[in-house]
Image (cartoon, rainbow, N blue to C red):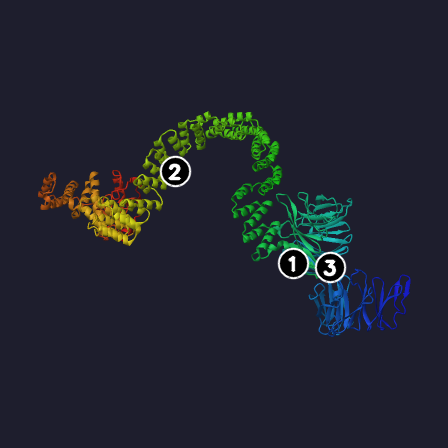
Amino acid sequence: MPTQIKPASLTAACGKHTKRITCGCWSAENLLALGGEDRMITVSNQEGDTIRQAQMRSEPSEMKFSMRKTDDRTSAENTISAVVGKKTLFIFNLNEPDNPVDVEFQPGYGNIVCYSWYSDNYVIVGFSRGTMVVISTHLREIGQEIFQARDYKDNLTSIALSQTLSKVATCGDNCVKIHDLVELKDMYAIINLDDENKGLGILSWTDDGQLLALSTQRGSLHVFLTKLPILGDTCGTRIAYLTSLLEVTVANIIEGETPVTVSVDVEPTFVAVGLYHLAVGMNNRAWFYIFGESCKSKSIPGVRKLKDMEYLGTVASICLHAEYAAALFEGKVQLHLIENDLLNAQEERETRLFPAVDDKYRILCHALTGDFLIYGTDTGVIQYFHIEDWQFINDYRHPVSVKKIFPDPNGTRLVFIDEKSDGFVYCPVNDATYEIPDLSPTIKGVLWENWPMNKGVFIAYDDDKVYTYIFHKDTIQGSKVVLAGGTKLPFSHKPLLFYNGELTCQTQSGKINNIYLSTHSFLCNLKEAQPADLQQMLAQTLLLKRFPDAWEICKILNEHTAWNELARACLHHMEVEFAIRVYRTIGNVGIVMSLEQIKGIEDYSLLAGHLAMFTNDFNLAQDLYLASSCPMAALEMRRDLQHWDSALQLAKRLAPDQIPFISKEYAIQLEFTGDYVNALAHYEKGITGNNKEHDDVCLAGVAQMSLRMGDIRRGANQALKHPSRALKRDCGSILESMKQFSEAAQLYEKGLYYDKAASVYIRCKNWAKVGELLPHVSSPKIHLQYAKAKEADGRYKEAVIAYENAKQWNSVIRIYLDHLNNPEKAVSVVRETQSLDGAKMVARFFLQLGDYGSAIQFLVMSKCNNEAFTLAQQHNKMEIYADIIGSEDTTNEDYQSIALYFEGEKKHLQAGKFFLLCGQYSRALKHFLKCPSSEDSVAIEMAIETVGQAKDELLTSQLIDHLMGESDGMPKDAKYLFRLYMALKQYREAARTAIIIAREEQSAGNYRTAHDVLFSMYTELKSQKIKIPSEMATNLMILHSYILVKIHIKNGDHMKGARLLIRVANNISKFPSHIVPILTSTVIECHRAGLRNSAFSFAAMLMRPEYRNKIDAKYKKKIEAMVRRPDTSETEEATTPCPFCQFLLPECELLCPGCKNNIPYCIATGHHMLKDDWSLCPHCDFPALYSEFKIMLNTESTCPMCSERLNSGQLKKIPDCTQYLQTEIEQ
């Protein structure tokens, strides 16, 4: 008979079942559920009354109450579950007794061994054949299998569930398996029990999940530790942490020390580690261990127990460093030596208790660094006790109590959290505190960065998250704490050590695990990161002040914006050297030069002010400048920025003598914005009385602003007195816009702006003044206005002069014709200006006079060709029209109409000319060939031009037949054939013809004509890159030598004349008309030059019978005497090097015996060319010896070859004549 035990009360529950009761359970609401062999389940209240009952198909077992969530949202245990017949799970809702649920399972699972409710309406069921199944009891999916796993091959004996750990343990087949309820497929642990060969029994967890117990069929009980108390401590980069209940591990992963395990005597509640010691303890007792001697040199081969110590109360926490330990207990801190033999004297330094007896406060937290004991009290005081001096050196008073303190490794910065859960960074150096933003109220602890290159970074953590902060000490905005970001903290991880973005955490399993903070993602492989990730990493590095890392990211991104972000961050953090390096990289020369100038400034506020100005935070810059040793920098900055209001305010305090100059600048700006009232006031304030240049500007401003304000008299007088022309112009413009024309004109005139003055006087109708100013006026517009006024007054001579100055030529022509009756002047103007309208007016004038020729001329000039043609037809003036139109650019229709007219008049030459102009070549040639003999020369020239333009073979053959006399039996001059070939660009035929023509001219004694024909043909062939015939080149050379003779003889250079005459005389057959005169001249010049043998030779030639009687009488006896008394002496000819091979040959020799090349000859002397004295005629490109040609041009003004005008200044000496020699070889 089950009973419920109450204080002094027993209630019987009889008659519930007819057979033996086999199972039962109590609910949290004091309901009793019973099941028995009668296959009945009953539910009774605490008075014993039956409130529910249900009939089963089989005997129930494993009965349990549970809270199954339904739509009514009740929180009571409203459901009974039981195993029925070891196969079915029966679920009975007390609120719905008519709807029980039977959940059946696959027969292959075996019998139900045990089950357990968990989470929200889920049941985990274990089966005898080793299977574990999770089902749902939600209404929509009741009985549905959520998870199934065959954990064991043979059998499963028990299931135990820990809601605290969120783990489920199963046992069977001599092992225990633990699953994570959050992710059931993940196996958390497997425990093998190979000694238990009789099988396993029941599993059970303690309420806190720390212990798991297992009974076995052999009668033994196994207890497993599932989680350890998370106890750990750090000192620098060394960590100590609990790895089992009686074991502590000491390690220094950063410095590569081998971890050492220390066995302890008790299960500790606190752990502390120092540089050389370890402390563990519980209640009021602590045990101290010392590392081996070699530990101090970075390795720990062994650990030995040093001592144990009892304190005056239960120890809350303990801190160690090198020599001292500090224990916190019951609001007090005891500071004592760890090893008493370290200091042989000064007993008072062995231990000290804080606070002193007289102090009425409790210590709530403490910390120990290499130099300081630091603690916080319930009265809000943070005390710094200096261990070496053994005295207090600093205290800070906070408004509320301080709960936790966390100093950095040096103790120079400290994070503390007060009773309001607000956090602050405290700097004892300047006794300043800085609030930590967005600090979670559930913060459990704080760790400072131990990496020495990134001081100022710390993390704050709670159970779920780690928050990264950085304390920016030196920024242009002052010191502040910034939240860098957060990182999720894995379950049951306690941070112990923070080093370079890596967080070392202790877990419940007694192990350590490393977590990489999301705020330090830039420490991964940067080269594999995407651009978007690199941008985020750059932001992290800048926030954490990791500028070298930011530099590497910027190099990879290679974007101007990224470099600029880095540079601005450097300026913000006052890293001037690094900012210079960045700006130099991106090529910002200006700011590099500015930073170079300020980088050596030691005044913090002045330097920060400059940097704030560079970042455009001008108000901050002003505050910093004013707080610096150079407050004037604030005034200079405001002036440079043109913040004149601020500049004036600063000047009143800092530099009153600058107020006038600032007022002037401010007035200029106010004038620009249209605030004339204030501009006038500031201009007046700007007048100093002792700075003339500055005062002139201010007085000019006063004048202009006075006019703007309507004070015309003051403004105009001020402007007239002022020396500036520009001011008079500007004030005149203002007055003109105000329609004060008289005053405006006066100012313009005074300022010598005559055009503007005249323009304003015209608006006043003051023509007299305009007339006075007109000689100084350059504007055509003003002259035009004046001219119109004078014309209206009938003063035409003055008007026409004004119109001429205004360049209004039509009006000038009109007045000359209509009013001044001076057509000659009108015609002259039309011819000079080519005015179309003027030409029409003149044409009408001549038409009225009956001068049709002049009328036609001016009609054509005015482009009235049809009227001119009609007039020419009517008055038989077509020749005049044709002459005029032939020299004008006009249309083919006009040319054709004239041609047709002349065709009708049988005037073939004129008809052919105009057919040629309109492109009708066949008709043009026909008329040219019909011309009478009196026009033969002109007609043939025109015919050649026609055929040359037409390029038609039929027309060409017609003209050739005419020239050869095929049509009229009279062959024409060969020169026409030459010109035809030239017009047709048949240069080879033209060259042959030119040689024939030149030969004829030469035979006739026309040597200059022959020379010009050969020269023109030579240059044409050269331009067409056609090889020059050797006969042509030789003939041209001989003719040119003959022409040079006269020049040299005239200049008295008889030697050059004689040498050239010898060359001509050697080719005397080419000069048949003047054989005797040429030979006579040769004899005389050779005699004069001392070439007696040559003179004798040519004199003997003259004595031949055919020449003797033709010798001039005055030279005949002298020549005969030379022959009778021969003198064979001869001056030797000078030798000069060949330009091709440097062979020395006579200077008049043109064929080199050494290289067999024809050497180019000098057009000034006839000598062969020299390589180092080469020049060219700039017109014909023929070579000449530079020195000789320059001497010749002193007396001659033309080139002897092409006859173009030339002076010595146009000559250029050519240092390298290789290309010209190459051309000679090719030719």
Residue under numbered circle 1? 514
Q: Residues within 10 Å of mark 1 (few under 14, many from 20)?
A: some
Residue under numbered circle 3? 229
Of mark 3 and mark 2, the one earlier in the sequence is: 3
Q: State the separation of the CA atoms marked 3 and 2.
A: 114 Å
Against 1165, residue 781 (above or below) is above
**Residue type at the position of mark 1:** Asn
Against 133, residue 685 (above or below) is above
Residue 298, image x, y percentages: 63, 56
Residue under numbered circle 2? 836
- The answer to which image quadrant residue 614 occupies is top right
Q: Residues within 10 Å of mark 2 (few under 14, many from 20)?
A: some
Against 219, residue 898 (above or below) is above
Give the total number of marks visible in the rendering: 3
**Residue type at the position of mark 3:** Pro
In the visual, does 1004 lie left or right of 172?
left
**Residue type at the position of mark 2:** Leu
Q: Residues within 10 Å of mark 3 (few under 14, many from 20)?
A: some
